[in-house]
C-alpha cells in the first residue's frame, strides 16, 4: 500500500480518537500501526514505474496538506501524528523512504511481518488504488469536522 493511504488512515484514526477526547489520542498510535499492517494485505500495482508511484503519492499528500491546513493548527498536528504512526513500519523498513528513492544504495529491510513476501492478499489495479486513497481522504475530511 502507498504512503498516502497509510498517512490518510493514520490521520483519520488520530482525528477520531482526538475527537473522543484529547487523552484518547494516545490510543491512536497503536491503532494507526495496526491499520498499516491490515492495509498492507492490499498490494500495490506492480506495473507502475517509480515516477508513477512518486507522482501518485505526491498528489494525494498535497491534498493531505490542504486538509491539514483547512482543519486548523491543532487538528493539523493531530493529523501529522496519525500520519507518522500510520507509516512507522515503512519508515523503519524502508529506511525513511530512502530505499524507495535509491533502492541500490539503501536496500529495504523486512523487520515488520507485513513486509515479508506472501503477505499480500491480492494485487489491486490502478483504479482500485486511486479509489481506495480517495475513500481514505474522504474519511479524513469527515473525521476532522
Image (cartoon, rainbow, N blue to C red):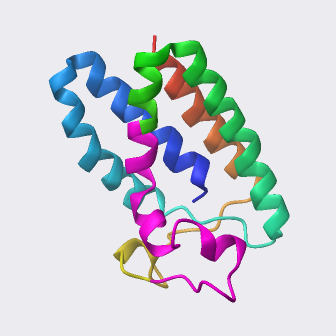
Q: Is residue 22 above or below residue 135?
A: above
Residue at image position (70%, 78%) is: 102
Q: Determine whether, in the image, residue 133 is placed left or right of residue 78.
A: right
Q: Is residue 83 above or below residue 55?
A: above
- The N terminus is located in which quarter? bottom right
Q: Determine whether, in the image, residue 63 is placed left or right of residue 31.
A: right
Q: Quadrant of residue 110?
A: bottom left
Frontmost residue, 98 versus 110: 98
Q: Determine whether, in the image, residue 20 is placed left or right of residue 124.
A: left
Q: Quadrant of residue 130?
A: top right
Q: Is residue 66 above or below residue 39?
A: above
Residue 91 x, y percent position in the rendering: 47, 64
Does the segment drawn in magenta span residue 82? yes
Does the segment drawn in magenta span residue 108? yes
Residue at image position (44%, 82%) is: 116
Q: Residue furthest left?
A: 23
Q: Quadrant of residue 133?
A: top right
Residue at image position (74%, 46%) is: 58
Frontmost residue, 37 versus 4: 4
Task: Report whether residue 33 is seen.
Answer: yes
Magenta range is 81-109
Residue 88 x, y percent position in the rendering: 40, 59
Task: Report whether residue 143 is seen.
Answer: no
Q: Is residue 53 above or below residue 112?
A: above
Residue 85 x, y percent position in the rendering: 37, 49
Residue at image position (42%, 20%) is: 75
- The tally of labels here is 0
Residue 10 x, y percent position in the rendering: 42, 41
Amino acid at each position: 500500500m502507498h504512503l498516502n493511504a497509510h498517512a490518510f488512515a493514520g490521520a483519520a484514526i488520530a482525528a477520531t480518537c482526538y475527537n473522543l477526547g484529547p487523552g484518547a489520542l494516545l490510543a491512536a498510535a497503536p491503532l494507526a500501526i495496526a491499520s498499516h499492517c491490515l492495509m498492507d494485505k492490499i498490494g500495490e500495482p506492480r506495473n507502475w514505474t517509480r515516477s508513477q508511484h512518486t507522482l501518485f503519492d505526491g498528489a494525494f499528500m498535497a491534498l493531505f496538506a490542504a486538509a491539514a491546513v483547512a482543519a486548523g493548527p491543532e487538528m493539523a498536528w493531530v493529523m501529522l501524528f496519525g500520519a507518522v504512526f500510520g507509516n512507522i513500519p515503512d519508515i523503519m523498513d524502508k529506511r525513511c523512504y530512502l530505499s524507495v528513492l535509491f533502492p541500490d544504495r539503501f536496500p529495504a529491510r523486512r523487520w515488520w511481518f507485513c513486509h515479508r513476501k506472501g503477505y499480500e492478499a491480492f494485487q489491486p489495479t490502478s483504479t482500485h488504488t486511486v479509489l481506495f486513497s480517495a475513500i481514505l481522504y474522504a474519511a479524513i475530511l469527515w473525521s476532522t469536522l
